[in-house]
Image (cartoon, grey):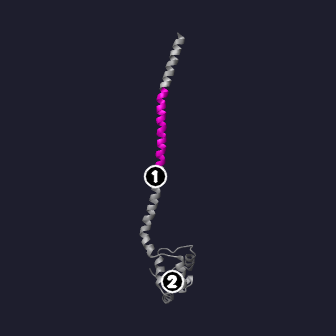
C-alpha cells in the first residue's frame, strides 16, 4: 500500500506543479510586457524632457533678444566700418578713444575683432559717424567725450 500512496502523492504534486506553471506563465508574460512598456514610457519621458529643455532654451533666447534686437538694428558695430570711420576722420586710436571716452587699447581691440564695444558705447560711436573732421577736432580740443 505504501507504493500506491507514494505514487498518488507524486501524481498530485506533478499535477499541482503543472497547474502552477500555467498560471505563472501568464503572470511572467504580462510582467515582461509591463516591463517593456515601462521602459518605452521612460524613453518617451526622457525625449520629451530634452525637447522641453531645448524649447525653453530657445524661447528664453528669443525673449531676451526681442527687446534688445530693436536697439541692435538701430545701433550696430562692424569692425571694418569702424576702421574706415577712424581713417576717414584722420584720428589715431588714442584720439578716437579720447573722443569716445574709452582707452586707445579698447579701440585697437575693437579693430582687431578681439573685443566688441559695450551697448552703452554704441550711441557714442553712432554720433561719431555723423561728425565731420572739423567737429571731431573741435571735440578733441575741448577734450570732452561724446555724450549719449
Residue located beneath label 1 in the image: 48
Residue 36, magenta (yes or no) = yes
Give the extent of the magenta segment.
20-44
In this rendering, the answer to whether 18 lies above or below 132 is: above
Q: Which mark is residue 4?
A: none
Q: Position of residue 63 (x, y in %)?
A: 42, 64
Query: Which quadrant of the figure has residue 109?
Result: bottom right
Question: In the rendered picture of this protein, how many numbered marks are placed on residues?
Answer: 2
| Quadrant occupied by the C terminus | bottom left
- Mark 2 and mark 1 in contact (Cβ < 8 Å)? no
Q: Position of residue 145 (x, y in %)?
A: 48, 83
Residue located beneath label 2 in the image: 99
Identified at 47% across, 42% down, the residue is 37
**Label 1 residue SS:** helix
Residue 143, magenta (yes or no) = no
Q: Position of residue 76 (x, y in %)?
A: 48, 75
Horizontal relation, residue 33 to residue 109: left or right: left
Amino acid at each position: 500500500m505504501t507504493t500506491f500512496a507514494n505514487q498518488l502523492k507524486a501524481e498530485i504534486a506533478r499535477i499541482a506543479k503543472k497547474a502552477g506553471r500555467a498560471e505563472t506563465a501568464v503572470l511572467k508574460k504580462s510582467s515582461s510586457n509591463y516591463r517593456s512598456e515601462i521602459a518605452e514610457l521612460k524613453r518617451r519621458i526622457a525625449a520629451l524632457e530634452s525637447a522641453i529643455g531645448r524649447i525653453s532654451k530657445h524661447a528664453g533666447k528669443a525673449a531676451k533678444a526681442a527687446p534688445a534686437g530693436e536697439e541692435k538694428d538701430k545701433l550696430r558695430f562692424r569692425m571694418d566700418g569702424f576702421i574706415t570711420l577712424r581713417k576717414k576722420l584722420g584720428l589715431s586710436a588714442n584720439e578716437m578713444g579720447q573722443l569716445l571716452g574709452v582707452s586707445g587699447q579698447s579701440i585697437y581691440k575693437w579693430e582687431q575683432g578681439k573685443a566688441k564695444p559695450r551697448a552703452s558705447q554704441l550711441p557714442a560711436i553712432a554720433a561719431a559717424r555723423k561728425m565731420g573732421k572739423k567737429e571731431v577736432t573741435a571735440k578733441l580740443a575741448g577734450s570732452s567725450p561724446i555724450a549719449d
